[in-house]
Image: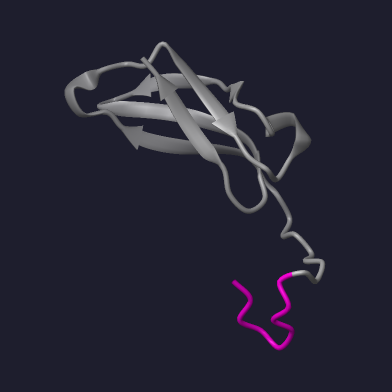
């Protein structure tokens, strides 16, 4: 959605500086631990398809390492 002065959806957009090596805290009700965590994002060619990322138990949740994020991505928990 473009809300600025130039609202044409087809115009090139300058992407923001990527967030690197971020840690996402995910609550896990019932303490059910996934066997694998994947990350996918159209922001980077490396994550165009779901790829495994590092994760570890963190209290009643999960700490997931997000290698690189510019605009949006999806974290997939596989049980």
Q: On the image, which quarter does residue 35 sit in? A: top left
- Our reading of the magenta stretch's main secondary structure is loop
Residue 30 horizontal/vertical position (percent): 17, 23
Looking at this view, name the residue that lies furthest to the left.
30
Classify residue 65 as left or right of residue 7.
Answer: left
Residue at image coords 46%, 38%? 24
Quadrant the C terminus occupies: top left
Q: How is the image coloured?
A: one colour
Looking at this view, name the residue that lies furthest to the top.
35
Q: Is residue 29 above or below residue 15?
A: above
Q: Is residue 53 above or below residue 41?
A: above
Q: Nearer the viewer, residue 63 or 28?
A: 28
Classify residue 10 as left or right of residue 57.
Answer: right
Residue at image coords 71%, 71%? 9
Classify residue 3 as left or right of residue 8.
Answer: left
Residue at image coords 70%, 50%? 18
Residue 61 horizontal/vertical position (percent): 31, 28
Residue at image coords 56%, 30%? 39
Residue 21 horizontal/vertical position (percent): 63, 36
* Total residue callouts: 0
Q: Is residue 11 above or below residue 6?
A: above
Residue 50 horizontal/vertical position (percent): 60, 26
Q: On the image, which quarter does residue 77 sit in? A: top left
Quadrant the N terminus occupies: bottom right
Span shown in magenta? 1-9
């Amino acid at each position: 959605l473009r809300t600025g002065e130039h609202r044409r959806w087809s115009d090139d957009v300058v992407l923001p500086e990527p967030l690197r090596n971020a840690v996402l805290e995910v609550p896990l009700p019932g303490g059910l631990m996934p066997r694998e965590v994947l990350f996918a994002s159209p922001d980077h060619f490396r994550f165009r398809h779901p790829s495994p990322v590092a994760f570890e138990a963190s209290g009643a949740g999960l700490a997931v390492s997000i290698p690189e994020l510019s605009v949006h991505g999806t974290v997939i928990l596989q049980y």
